[in-house]
Amino acid sequence: MVEQKPISPQQQVRQRAPAQAKPQLPVASITIGLPWRLMVFSFVLFLFSIFIFAGLQYGYGTYLDAQTVEVDENIAALAQQVSESEQEELLLFYSQLTNLQKVLDRRVFTVNTFPFLEKNTLPLVYYTEAQYTAEEGVVILNGVANSMQVFVQQITLFEESPEVERVIIDDVGLERGTVSFGLHIAFQSEFLKRLQQ
């Protein structure tokens, strides 16, 4: 027979108590699915980009080339239908239209400057020539005054006008009792802005 050793009271309590389960801590699981999914998405996006590029390069590019050739052929056919003399006439007409457009774009001289001159010219003064240089904002006037006193009054009237920056006298001459003159009238920048509108 086997001899038993005496058991201490603490050991007896341990043997009698049912074995309690140790509390289990949750184990964190690391998933590696996100980088894999991102890589697959990037690869699909890359393949889609290559597909779009190839479609544009070989499909749409070929279509555009065909359209260009067709338009070139239509232009050549139209050129054969129009004779050289008609082409020259059309070119001349286009040139005239372009020149007319330039002249009309500079019409601010007639629209705004003539009313200014009408308002600021004495009755005994008349102009024989008027030019306008838009780059400098200057009106060049040649004219005739009844006397030297009338000419001086006209210059004073221009100089006192708020639209005028300065008046430069180019030349003055006496002819048969009248005064012929040449002037440069430089306008204020505000007046020129109103001219351009």
Image (cartoon, rainbow, N blue to C red):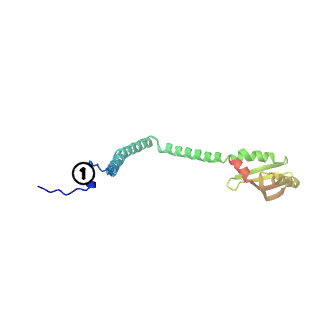
Question: Which amino acid type is marked by label 1?
Answer: Gln
Asked if residue 95 lies left or right of residue 195, the reply is left
The location of residue 10, given as percent across then percent down, is 28, 55
At x 25%, y 49%, the residue is: 16
- Identify which residue, 20 or 143, lies in the foreground: 20
Residue at 79% over, 45% down: 118
Q: Can residue 154 be seen at all in this image of the molecule?
A: yes
Image quadrant containing the N terminus:
bottom left
The location of residue 122, given as percent across then percent down, is 84, 48
Q: Nearer the viewer, residue 6 or 21?
A: 6
Residue reaching furthest to the left:
1
Q: Which residue is mark 1?
A: 15
Q: Which residue lies at the image location 47% right of the left edge and 45% below the top edge?
A: 84
Would residue 130 appear left or right of 93 to someone viewing this image? right
Asked whether 7 or 135 is in front, the reply is 7
Left or right, 47 with respect to 168, comes to: left
Q: How many marks?
A: 1
Q: Position of residue 177 (x, y in %)?
A: 87, 54
Can you see residue 176? no
- For label 1, the crowd category at 10 Å Cα-Cα, with few meaning under 14, some 14 to 19 and many 20 or more, is few
Query: Residue reaching furthest right?
Result: 149
Q: Position of residue 98 (x, y in %)?
A: 58, 46
- Horizontal arrangement in the rendering, residue 170 relative to residue 133 (left or right): right
Describe the element under mark 1 as helix, strand or loop: helix
